[in-house]
Image: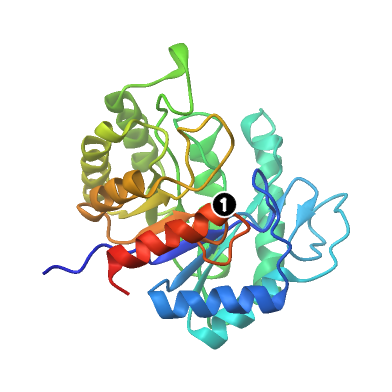
Amino acid sequence: MPTPPRISGTFLDEITHDIPSQNWGRDQWRREFELYATIGIDTVIIIRAGYQNKCIFPAKSIPDLLPVYEDIGEMFFSLADELGLKVYFGTYDSGYFWYRRSWWKEVDLNKAFIDEAVMRYGHHPSFQGWYLCHETSRNDAHIIELFNHIGRHCKSVKDVPVLISPFPQGAKQFSGGEVMSLDESLDHWERIFADTQGAFDICAFQDGQIHYQELPRFLAGVGDLGTRHDVRIWSNLETFDRDMPIKFPPADWRFLRLKLEAAAEIAEKIITFEFPHFMSPNSCYPAAHNLFDRYRDFCQY
């Protein structure tokens, strides 16, 4: 009997941009990372280390930074070193400059931020990748310039793989005339992949913006893009639910399994946004505990 597909990486959203803080300390994070080491999650991805005036460490490169009471980045890297996990470090999002004409200010802020991160964390063996946190659905918002300048700078200061996680402009996130067909979305990403060759190594498309029945065709198109442009294809399996009228509960296991099995047909690796909140037995959401039980049953742990 074939081994069921499994999640082997997760984002960590400690800026808690649009999900609640769980107020975990080192003991809770140790328990979480120890769980990863036992269930096959070998990679953690800090989705953004800085956002607007917030940061997971006391960065000198971010203007008007709010007080930072603990170096969460150091905690993540130290735990990952100890437990044999890989960390991908997420870049900085101003929440302002990058989709305006002053996009170059976003680049300058990120270059200084990246340099500071390498000085602070570059010695950790677990520092195994970068994550470009500027997520978009199309060739817009100066994304080609951002990927080229920021991704290449990451590689110049610490040459480890660079990951992106964009999304299709589908009906579950957009409405009316803003929705793109799958062909339109893939055309946009054809141009982006072609014009950013070498700026990133891995692409993990988010899977929650389109209807479930569209996933196989979209994933096949993404796989073809990766083959032609020499980009490794992972899948970002969203473990939260976009079908509910509230923002955001843990996913329904039946549909998560459908997405998991579809991704396994194409993706080299399946990661998720975001295990700690939406799928962990340690989550603040009781439904996440149940989702983990269903996943554990499926994987036959």
The kind of residue tagged 1 is Ile
Q: Quadrant of residue 71?
A: bottom right
The secondary structure type at the circle numbered 1 is: helix
Q: Nearer the viewer, residue 58 or 119?
A: 58
In the rendered image, the quadrant that contains the N terminus is bottom left
Location of residue 45 in the rendering, given as x and y in whole percent from the top left corner = 53, 62
Question: Would residue 1 appear left or right of 291 to someone viewing this image?
Answer: left
Location of mark 1 (residue):
150
Location of residue 49 in the rendering, given as x and y in whole percent from the top left corner = 66, 58
Q: Is residue 264 visible?
A: yes
Q: Nearer the viewer, residue 12 or 257?
A: 257
Q: Nearer the viewer, residue 114 or 258?
A: 258
In the rendered image, the quadrant that contains the C terminus is bottom left
Figure disc tally = 1
Q: Is residue 123 visible?
A: no
Q: How is the image coloured?
A: rainbow
Rendered view: 169 above or below 207: above
Question: Would residue 202 appear left or right of 178 to someone viewing this image?
Answer: left
Q: Residue at x 41, y 58 (%)?
A: 271
Location of residue 170 in the rendering, given as x and y in whole percent from the top left corner = 40, 27
Question: Would residue 23 appear left or right of 226 to someone viewing this image?
Answer: right
Location of residue 184 in the rendering, given as x and y in whole percent from the top left corner = 32, 24
Q: Within 10 Å of the Cα at label 1, are there few (<14), some (14-19), or many (20+) other Cα atoms?
A: many
Q: Residue at x 56, y 44 (%)?
A: 134
Q: Residue at x 41, y 63 (%)?
A: 293
The residue at the far left in this view is 1
Q: Quadrant of residue 103?
A: top right
The residue at the far bottom in this view is 82
Rendered view: 216 above or below 296: above
Question: Would residue 188 appear left or right of 12 to someone viewing this image?
Answer: left
